[in-house]
Image (cartoon, rainbow, N blue to C red):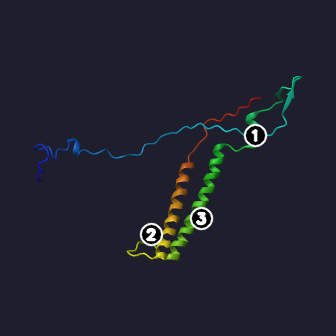
Amino acid sequence: MMESGYYPPGAEFDPNALYNQSEPPEIPVELTATETMTKTITVYTNKVWRVYDEEGYGSYESDGFEPRETWDEQTDSLEVTLNKALEEITALRKEAEAQQLKLEAHYGVRHGTIPGASHPDAAHLKMRKQLWDAMERIRHLKALEEALAGWETDEREVESDI
């Protein structure tokens, strides 16, 4: 190796010199995320009623009203809702993959490729756009599947002002 002359003598190829060092490679690290979300909904029950005093002010009274039990009866948990959404998106992805295969067979291209051309005409550009859009839809649906998968319910609270 011949030195260029722009560095101090013996420093150009020194692995300890700042200009010869590189960042360490990225590695995967598992994290556990905890998110708290709140939702207010209306439930229907015959175990609560409104009582008014002489001055017209009202308050609620109840007879055995259990907010958590009523919530469970009338609403899916967030975990169940996420799993339903995951199933629906998985079905959409599989349908999109089948459509992509049909499109590739129609155009006679190899799976997962978009053929290039040095001087593409309008039909070739249309084909490339359709193949690209099909692949992008599948990538998007896979990202949604990944984001929805793996959530677990650790704790669930249901409160009422009654």
Against 75, residue 161 (above or below) is above
The residue mark sitting in front, 2 or 3, is 2
Residue at image point 43% right, 43% down = 29
> Are discs 3 and 1 less than 8 Å apart at CB?
no
Residue at image point 67% right, 39% down = 39
Query: Mark 1 = which residue?
Result: 42
Q: Is residue 108 visible?
A: no
Q: Position of residue 117 (x, y in %)?
A: 40, 74
Query: Mark 2 = which residue?
Result: 114
Q: Secondary structure at mark 3?
A: helix
- In which quadrant of the rendered view does residue 44 lie? top right
Question: Which amino acid does the dot numbered 2 rest on?
Answer: Ile
Query: Mark 3 = which residue?
Result: 95
Residue at image point 15% right, 46% down = 12
Left of 113 or right of it: where is 95?
A: right
Left of 101 or right of it: where is 84?
A: right
The residue mark sitting in front, 3 or 1, is 1
Q: Is residue 75 visible?
A: yes
Along the line of sight, which residue is nearer the eye, 69 or 132? Answer: 132
Mark 1 crowdedness (10 Å alpha carbons): few <14, some 14-19, many ≥20: few
